[in-house]
Image (cartoon, grey):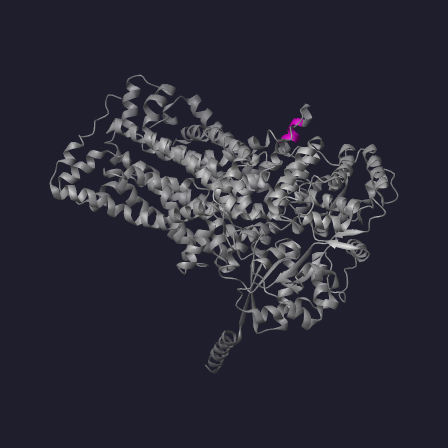
Amino acid sequence: MKLFKSAVCAVALAAFATSASARDLVMNANTSDPAQKLAMENLIAEFEAAYPEIDVKFNLYDHEAFKVAMRNFLVSDAPDLITWNAGNRMKVFVDLGLFEDVSDVWEAEGLYEKMPAVVGASSVDGKQYGVPYAYYAWGFYYRKDLFEQAGITETPTTWEEFKAVGEQLNAAGITPVTIGTKNLWPAAGWFDFLNLRVNGVEFHAELMDGKVAYTDPRVRAVFEKWGELVEADFYIENHPAYSFQEALPFMNQGNAAMYLLAPFIVSMFPEDVRAQVEWFPFPIIDSDVGIYEDAPTDSFHIPVNAKNKEDARLFLAFAAQADVQTRTAATLDMLPPNVNASVKDDRFAQGGFAQLSKADGIMQFFDRDTDPALAKVAMQGFQEFLQNPDRLDRILEQIEAERARIYGAL
Amino acid sequence: MFPRPIQETTRARQVMYKVALPVSLVVWLLPMIAIIATAGRSLSDLNYGNYWGIPTEWVFFENFAAVFGSSSIGVYLLNSFIITIPSIIGALFLSTLAGAGLALYRFRGRFFLLALFIAGNFVPFQILMIPVRQLTLDLGVYDSYLGVILFQIAFQTGFCTFFMRNFIAELPFELVEAARAEGVSEWKILIHIIVPLVRPALAALAVLQFTFIWNDFFWPLILIQSDELRPITLGLTTLKGQFISSFNLLAAGSLIAALPPVMMFFAMQKHFIAGLTLGASKG
Amino acid sequence: MADLPMMPAQRTRMTTSFFRKHKLLLMPLAFIAPAFAMFSLFVIYPIIQSIGLSFTQWQGIGPKTWVGLNNYRMLFNDAVFWTSLMNNVYWLVLFLLAPVFGLFVALFLNQTVFGIRLVKSLFFFPFVVSQIVVGIIFAWFYDPAFGLLATVLEPIGLDMPPILSDETLATFGIILAGLWPQTAYCMILYLTGLNSVNPEVIEAARLDGAKGWQLLVKIVLPQLRAATFIALVVTIIGALRSFDLVAVMTEGGPYNSSNVLAYYMYDNAIFRYRMGYASSIATVLFLIMNVYIVWFLMRLWNNEKGTR
């Protein structure tokens, strides 16, 4: 009986304790990739261990559903924290006054020194509106065994070498590049790199800001280079039928040798294939142009209408710590923005890190850097160009019309 | 009965039917079989492009365990029932009333009213997202079961009214006339004459509504935020990644989600033929 | 058809006592009022608001700018709008095969043999299973490299056309996938309808020597009128709302060739942050459909006048 009594007391006490001191921290996230899920679960568990009085309520959405839901919850019943992307995608919501200024967290935690690479992407007018937890490099994932089979010993570093590699692969009966353009964005990666390599980062940034016409000869120069690849049969057939994921079997089956993509692909190579996969950065086209890279950045933000901003700030500070970032980025196969964190010891993360370290400038990604409506029209244009290079004039006019609609005539 | 019951036909035809039935079932369900097979494949097989061949290994158990393990699927299933059942009852109740009102009486404006109920279905409903969200906020039912239920009742009432009106309009009107002549109240006519006669239609409509509301994930996405209130369709979308989708888990999850409506259909079938005897006077 | 008893004349109803006349006016209003109230609040009112939004430029959040008819002007100059509209016409026309197929499946299954309830339930499955998964499976079915069709066709020396990456074929590939669940839907409606077909009329017709096709067209189909009307309406609604399959199979591509208005609207509203423009697409679709509804109801009315 005594035992029973004390048990009841204990339960009552525990219930009292949780209800009295538990602070709810609601977090809505779009991190539904398997690795992302795991990384977030771990991060939240670590945070709750460090702050036992805080209870994180985690609402996970798939990425597209999140875009739908976000516009609703930000203005109605906002969570305390959300995951989103730095750069222009963040700026849209900052301009609408929906994201909280978190410069104080940057200040207090000394993040300006600790995360120099992502300050720009997190800032609007000199204030910071989010704290990045991971970023990543884009580059070529290629199969070493197929390269060897085609007699290629060195990875290409220049445009000429790159085209030669494609020629050799084709001669060996291997399609040089796999790509799935149903999702559109895989093609945008190509455009970004070609433009950055041909015209440099300043021009690219201006183009993304709608300050240059898509019918500009410098844009045409990019498509000229791109057309060389299309003409030389670099790409697999029927790529609009495939999502980025559905285009992967070509590489896994050994029909295609390279894929221009980002680290989230790594876990998708079956183990025996992964053993053969290596990484190289996008080759140099014009040696007078510096090395510029895409490095999409994922970050945490506090909605302006959040209820528990104090604990949300605690979370931001926690997620920015070097050791936490080391673990999060490692689970994600991505890079930690905190310079004191360590980069995962594998060839992909290290390769991407080395490339970004020597980069002269960094962009986010086509559909994160420019207006979403323009991005859509442009990416559809890229897809059409890859299938029908002869339609280039009409395609560029279409994109330019959309640019002019959004940013005005030049 | 049409077509002629197979039992009354020649022996040869009976045998043919018995063969044709399973064969057509297999052909019809070929995509379904593919979905089931996908639910048993490993992601590695799918990444190899092995969508149709013999899988290198069957991982049914692992995949279903992963679906159950990675999400609170039990809660989601329960939520789906909590949302679906009151919504159906509400929509069927309102629409039987309205359907009878439109079918049994002649008054000016009924044409317009029926058109209105149908017209509501012809809007691409996603566009209503923001006004509806605002409305549920104003009513204080945002992020609750009630918000979704109220909306589902209202939205489905349009189609259901149209459906019920048509079936009621097909009923032998002299039954209503006779009852009225005997002084039976309109309400009693509805309950004791109309409703028993339209039971098959109500059963079919209940099955359809169950499927619609059960499968809808757009409105819960807009009107519900908390993970613990989500129905299964919304819960399962998180198997679709930002970049990477676990197609095998998606297939497994979709099978789990599809079972309740199919069982509902199985259970409601016997009601499809009820009311037949009463309806016999019709012609 | 001679044995169809005619309804008593309507006139008897109209000439009864004042009270009854009164009652027959009030009862329908009482019956309809609750449904009408709910529907107006949650559907009609938001529709009106959405139509209002079509005259604004709006990201979906933040300030709205009144732009008058600007969205409509843009819309009519938008090639994607016209492509989508055309594709919706293809959807509408080809989707009408679903009621036809559905009728035949229902006739085929309308027997009482052992296990038929289970068989019917299994035939119902496609309608129930997630459209997203249906889309994925059909995409793999068509996959020109690893798809089932390609695997079957290749050994016999036939080339698999790349259906979903071909700008002229993509829409039809998606419609075919859509017909599968839609047929199951129509099947249900006809199974219900067949159960309320009067067996005496059938038997009488059989005695008169009617059978097979003739019996179906002359005797059975007229009795399935309610089911047919509903099947047509839901099929048309389905064709116009075609959305999930387009989203998952092609995202409207390649380069918008398989886009439809519902998806284009959604794409604008959600992914392009153009809520006002999306509203104008929805409004145009709504107006087109209203013309159709009115025409449809006229026919329904005239039809019923014939029998009442």
Q: Does residue B232 show up?
A: yes
Classify residue A289 as left or right of residue A123. right
> Residue A321's x, y, as percent?
70, 68
Q: Residue at x 81, y 51 (%)?
A: A291
Name the residue located 38 percent from the left edge and 20 percent from the top edge.
C213
Residues in magenta, as a range: C149-153
Furthest residue toward bottom? A2
Quarter of the image for the C terminus of chain C: give it.
top left
Of residue C295 and residue A57, the one placed in the foreground of this image is C295
Secondary structure mainly formed by the magenta segment: helix
Q: Say if the magenta span includes residue C124.
A: no
In this view of the protein, which residue sits in the foreground, A382 or B6? A382
Residue A342, image x, y percentages:
77, 64
Residue farthest left in this picture: C17
Q: Quadrant of the N terminus of chain C?
A: top left
- Would residue C236 appear left or right of A311 to someone viewing this image? left
Residue found farthest to the front? A410
User: x and y percent of residue A372 in the render?
Assistant: 61, 48
The answer to whether residue A272 is seen in the rendering is: no
Q: Is residue C151 magenta?
A: yes
Does residue A62 appear left or right of residue B272 in this picture? right
Depth check: give the residue in front, A128 or C124: A128
Q: Is residue B236 above or below residue C209?
A: below
- Above or below for C125 versus A317: above
Q: How many marks?
A: 0
| Image coords of residue C232 (percent x, y) | 40, 32
